Amino acid sequence: MAWHNKGNALYQTGRYSESIAAYDEAIRQKPDYAEAWSGKGSVLLALGRYEEAIKASDEAIFLNPSLAQSWNNKGSALGELGRLDQALPCFEQAIQLDQRYVKAWINKGILLQAQGKTSEAESAFAIAAELTGGQEP
């Protein structure tokens, strides 16, 4: 748990390489630690290492399918790779797991907008705005 927390703190301060090393140590100590895999997926996504982010997210999902963040990360990575039809179900699963997950609603809206589904995108954005009280997430 300590290495996972360190990974989170390093990620929040933009120290991505060190964050990955901390998550890797958490995973080395406890290979079935889904939250560490999910955190690693977040960092890899931030670094633009999309295929690796998908693999880390898949491992987290395998270990704990109820981690909304992992589904959102996977959807974001797939979207960045242009695999929109695969990304949408990931965002929808994240939302099903946590209906108040603003990032997932926003990502779903962005994806729908990219697919030309304007009214569906506007609905997703409206829900995100309602959840944040109109404030930036």
Image (cartoon, helix red, strand yellow):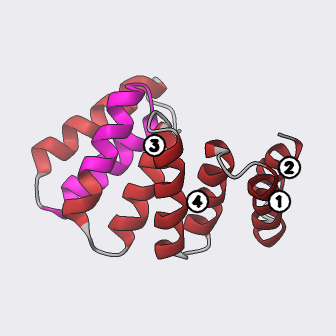
The residue that disc 1 covers is 25
Start-end of magenta stretch: 89-115
Q: As rendered, which of 53 and 123 lies closer to the eye? A: 53
Tell me the crowding category of disc 3: few under 14, some 14 to 19, or many 20 or more residues within 10 angstroms, Cα based: some
Q: Report whether 45 appears left or right of 30.
A: left
Q: Secondary structure at mark 1?
A: helix
Q: Position of residue 128 (x, y in %)?
A: 37, 33
The residue that disc 2 covers is 3
The first of marks 1 and 4 along the sequence is 1
Q: Report whether 69 appears left or right of 116.
A: right
Q: CA distance from mark 3 to mark 4?
A: 15 Å
Residue shown at 35% from the left, 75% from the top: 81
Residue shown at 28% from the left, 32% from the top: 126
Mark 3 near mark 2, Cβ–Cβ under 8 Å? no
The nearer-to-camera label among 3 and 1 is 1
The residue that disc 3 covers is 103
Q: Secondary structure at mark 2?
A: helix
Q: CA distance from mark 1 to mark 2?
A: 6 Å
Q: Secondary structure at mark 4?
A: helix
Kind of residue at badge 2: Trp
The nearer-to-camera label among 1 and 4 is 1
The nearer-to-camera label among 3 and 4 is 4
Magenta-drawn stretch contains 79 = no
The residue that disc 4 covers is 41
Q: Position of residue 75 (x, y in %)?
A: 37, 56
Quadrant for the N terminus in the image? top right
